[in-house]
Each structure stands twice: as C-alpha cells, then as structure tokens.
Image (cartoon, helix red, strand yellow):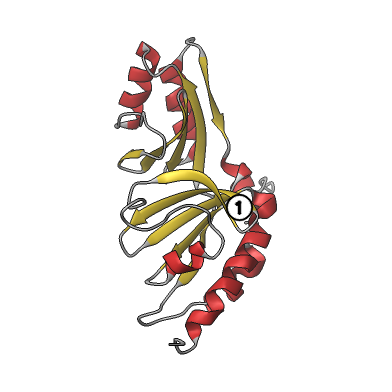
Amino acid sequence: MAEPTAADPAALRTSPLAHLAERMRAATVTGARGVALTEWQFLTMVNVRVDVASEAADRVEKALGTALPTECGTTTGSGPHTVVWLGPDEWLVLSQAEVTAVVTELREALTTAPGSVVDVSANRTTLELSGPAARKVLEKGCPLDLHPRSFGPGRAVSTTVGPVPVLLWQTDDTPTYRLFPRSSFADYLTRWLIDAMGEYGGPEIP
C-alpha cells in the first residue's frame, strides 16, 4: 500500500471572502446601470524595496520585464506582472505567476544590494468592481476624485473606501477597479460594497 502523501499546502488555503462568494454573485446588476463585484483569490503580491537609481534596480526591472514606476499613482506592467508605486523606493508587484518563482527571481536580482523582497500575498485580498455604475458605487465612500479627468486606467493609489484603507487600481475604461484591502478588513469592505451596489438594481430615480 502506498504511503499517504502530505496535502499540498496551496490546496488548504481559504480565501478571506469565500463565505461571501454567493452574496457577491447575487448582488450583480446588469444593464446600463450594471455593476459586479468579484474576488480574485490568491493573487501573488510581492513588496520590493530598492534604490531606484541603483544597478540592483536595473536588475529588478530586467527580471520583471518592465520599468519601476517613479511617480505617485502610477503603474507599469509586462506579461503577468503589474508594478504599483508605493513610495520613492518601494513597490508592490502584482502577478499571476507563481509566488515562489517571482520571489526567487527578484531576490536573485537584488543579490546583496540594500533592499528587500517580501512575499505579502496573504496580507491582502483582491476585489474587482466593474461595470457602468462602478465609479458611482465607489464615490459613495471614497474621498478621491475618480472622474476620468483625474483618475483613469493605470492609476493606483492608497486611499479609503468607506472606513477601510485600500490600494485602489483602475484597470480599464469600463470602468474596472481592483481594490486591495487587508484580509482582516475584506469582509467589512465587501458587505459595504454590496450594500452600496443595491440601488442600481432598481429603476433610476429622476
């Protein structure tokens, strides 16, 4: 008889919003005032700190296949990776690649230079809010000016939605937004968004 094998640790993970998946699906609104909320589970997130003017930063950029963004609110991307500016020497790498491979490659690029590469994937989860009414939903509780003249695709900043701190990234003109709350706040934020979406399922009040 074959010896039992240890379970794959990745298979044991539970998303912080798995229990709200059906409620998110049920809250979807279609049509001209449509809006939908979904969770992207287990997205790879890696925090990178390095001197942007250093040779180590050049190696990190080569590993990612894209330049590190150098201005607040900006992002860059290539292939499975998107890099979000967090500070003058700090970035968040969002990736659809396997986390161990991303961390290993970036640590090899950093080598012994001052800086750090840290897997922070479990620190946050990813919510995607999309549809014609998505901006109006966010405007109920986000202090940013989200009008297209000020905030559009490729923009990503730290802000709040309701009382919850998030990293907010607009990915396209639909509009589609991805919100990155701390895992411990994800339940509250999701319920807040579902409630804010509710009015768009009914007729528009003149």
Q: Does residue 62 sit above or below 182 in this rendering? A: above
Question: Is 9 in front, or is 54?
Answer: 54
Q: Is residue 19 left or right of residue 64?
A: right
Question: Is 89 in front, or is 16?
Answer: 89
Whether residue 1 appears in this view of the structure is no
Residue 77, percent from left and from top = 32, 40
Residue 95, percent from left and from top = 43, 43
- Residue found at the very far top of the displayed protein: 112
Residue depicted at x 37% and y 58%: 147
Q: Does residue 114 sit above or below 64 in this rendering? A: above
Residue 56 position by quadrant: top left
Residue 53 position by quadrant: top left
Residue 206 position by quadrant: bottom left
Residue 35, percent from left and from top = 44, 73
Residue depicted at x 46% and y 90%: 203
Q: Does residue 37 sit above or below 161 in this rendering? A: below
Residue 8, percent from left and from top = 61, 47
Whether residue 170 appears in this view of the structure is yes
Query: Which residue was labeled with disc 1?
Result: 11
Mark 1 surroundings: few (<14), some (14-19) or many (≥20) residues within 10 A: few
Residue depicted at x 30% and y 60%: 173
Q: Does residue 66 sit above or below 54 in this rendering? A: below
Residue depicted at x 35% and y 19%: 59
Q: Is residue 34 left or right of residue 189?
A: left
Q: Amino acid at mark 1?
A: Ala
